[in-house]
Amino acid sequence: MHGANYRTGNGQPYTRKEYIKGKPQIKIAKFSGGKRDDYDYCVQLCSNEKMQIRHMAIESARLSANKKIEQVAGETGYFSQLRIYPHILLRENKMIATAGADRLQEGMRGAFGKAVSLAARVDKGQVIMEAFVKKEHLEFTKKALHGACVKLPITPTIKVIKITPIKPAST
């Protein structure tokens, strides 16, 4: 099946993995990377529309962004986090599409489909990924997240939020 067939989430999501034999494994290796620290800015990748994103696309975008940020900021100069989790099962009823296949197929009889992939449903304005960085790495982080946008089936927005440090109350 073509990836575009799974972009829109039609109907109720199917998440009951306990009923499916041979469910697909999640492709995302890590949901957070870098080092937690006090950073100046939070750069967010936000969705512009309601859509489903497959777990391969999420992992590809995460790898791309983290690799580019790590080149400039180092392993401990940033902290990135995925804010979505692919828990929706995508099913496909595979059909034979060769000559003479009409005698082998059963058509729509019992067409539940096999689980082929996992996806995350994203709403409009929802944060997909965020990276916390110091001021000197801000512009490069925006470019890195822009490069990660290419891996996703949507064109997300990049938001920059200045983090204000919390001062302790004086007594």
Image (cartoon, helix red, strand yellow):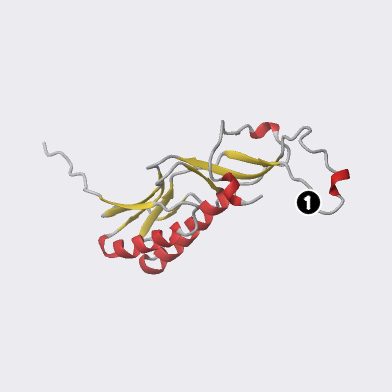
Residue under the point 57% across and 53% down: 56
The quarter of the picture where the C terminus appears is top left
Q: Is 159 positioned to the left or the right of 15 in the image?
A: left
Residue assigned mark 1: 97
Q: Nearer the viewer, residue 34 or 3?
A: 3
- Percent coordinates x, y for residue 77 in the rendering: 35, 61
- Percent coordinates x, y for residue 123 in the rendering: 43, 39
Image position of 42 with respect to 65: above or below = above
Q: Total number of numbered labels?
A: 1
- Percent coordinates x, y for residue 68 in the rendering: 42, 65
Q: Nearer the viewer, residue 7 or 63?
A: 7
- Percent coordinates x, y for residue 35 in the rendering: 39, 55
Binning the other alpha carbons within 10 Å of mark 1 as few (below 14), some (14 to 19) or many (20 upward) gives: few
Q: Nearer the viewer, residue 127 or 18?
A: 127
In the current view of this chain or complex, which residue is farthest to the bottom?
Answer: 71
Residue under the point 79% across and 38% down: 107
Residue under the point 56% across and 48% down: 54
Residue type, mark 1 in image: Ala
The image quarter containing residue 125 is top left
Q: Is 95 positioned to the left or the right of 67 in the image?
A: right
In the current view of this chain or complex, which residue is farthest to the left?
Answer: 171
The image quarter containing residue 144 is bottom left
Q: Is 146 positioned to the left or the right of 164 in the image?
A: right
Q: Nearer the viewer, residue 140 or 11?
A: 11
Q: Circle 1 — which element?
A: loop
Residue under the point 15% across and 38% down: 169
